[in-house]
């Protein structure tokens, strides 16, 4: 199957700083990537859909100025958590859709963000 | 907002026993997927069911999609410790060629050796 990587896997930052998370499709091109958020012992919640070359589509209740998404190439999408606060601490997971695999989404290993 | 409720939320059983996890919604989905997630990792796709009433088997796991495409079940036969994990169902919503996943509430399964 297709491989999706995320970097970093873990990040700890101080409140008020910004953190960038990268999501890469390693062996396929992804016109669409998705960003999810998962709180401890909870399910995944879709935050936004990232389309290469266009603006991301955010789900209801997700602040687009808080969570900046850039999908500059067919293999890379970035999520920047701006002015992070402790309540932003979570597990962030991206997925990438490979149209050659019947629209299946392949998930990255996740990034654990801890804001102090 | 489409909600997918899974039951039970937590399940702890002895190795060798059988179990069933349910995924229910009031919404109709074009297809439904089941994932397993290990701690600190992303979810891994187990199966996709597309047709109402469809049954798919993956070794000891049997997946069924409801006739109305609103619900699904996962049955595990003779559970093993390696089956331990978070099981997530996800409904697929198609919108003008764009597909989004709505994840269920999750079932945390622990198999006791």
Image: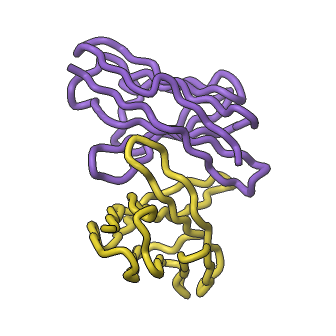
| Total numbered circles | 0
Q: Residue at x 63, y 35 (%)?
A: A51
Q: Is residue A38 left or right of residue A85?
A: right
Q: Residue at x 42, y 31 (%)?
A: A111
Instruction: Locate the C terminus of chain A and report the quarter of the image it occupies.
Output: top left
Q: Is residue B105 left or right of residue A70?
A: left
Work out whether residue A29 or residue B62 is closer to the camera in this orientation and state it: B62
Q: Residue at x 36, y 31 (%)?
A: A112
Colour approach in the figure: by chain
Q: Residue at x 72, y 29 (%)?
A: A74
Tell me: residue A23, above or below residue A58.
above
- The chain letter corresponding to purple is A
Point out residue B74 in the picture as x, y percentages from the top left corner: 47, 76
Point out residue A8 in the picture as x, y percentages from the top left corner: 47, 22
Spot the residue most to the right.
A100
Which quadrant of the structure image shows residue A65?
top left
Which quadrant of the structure image shows residue A75?
top right
Work out whether residue A15 or residue B44 is closer to the camera in this orientation and state it: B44
Spot the residue most to the front.
B113
- The chain letter corresponding to yellow is B
Work out whether residue A35 or residue A52 is closer to the camera in this orientation and state it: A35
Point out residue B33 in the picture as x, y percentages from the top left corner: 55, 65
Which quadrant of the structure image shows residue B109?
bottom left
Point out residue A115 in the picture as x, y percentages from the top left corner: 25, 22
Determine if residue B75 is in view. no
Determine if residue A26 is in view. yes
């Amino acid at each position: 199957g297709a491989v999706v990587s995320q970097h970093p896997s873990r990040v700890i930052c101080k409140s008020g700083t910004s953190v960038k998370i990268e999501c890469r499709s390693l062996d396929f091109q992804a016109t669409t990537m998705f960003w999810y958020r998962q709180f401890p012992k909870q399910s995944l919640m879709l935050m936004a859909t990232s389309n290469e070359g266009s603006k991301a589509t955010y789900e209801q209740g997700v602040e687009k100025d808080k969570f900046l998404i850039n999908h500059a190439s067919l293999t890379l999408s970035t999520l920047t958590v701006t002015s992070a606060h402790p309540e932003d601490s979570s597990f962030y997971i991206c997925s990438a859709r490979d149209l050659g695999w019947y629209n299946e989404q392949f998930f990255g290993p996740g990034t654990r963000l801890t804001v102090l | 907002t489409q909600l997918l409720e899974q039951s039970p939320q937590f399940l702890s059983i002895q190795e060798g026993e059988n179990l069933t996890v349910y995924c229910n919604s009031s919404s109709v989905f074009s297809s439904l997927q089941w994932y397993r997630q290990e701690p600190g990792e992303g979810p891994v796709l187990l199966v996709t069911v597309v047709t109402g009433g469809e049954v798919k088997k993956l070794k000891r796991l049997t997946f069924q999609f409801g006739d109305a495409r609103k619900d699904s079940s996962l049955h595990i036969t003779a559970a093993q410790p390696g089956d331990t994990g978070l099981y997530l169902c996800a409904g697929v919503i198609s919108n003008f060629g764009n597909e989004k996943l709505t994840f269920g509430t999750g079932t945390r399964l622990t198999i006791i050796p």
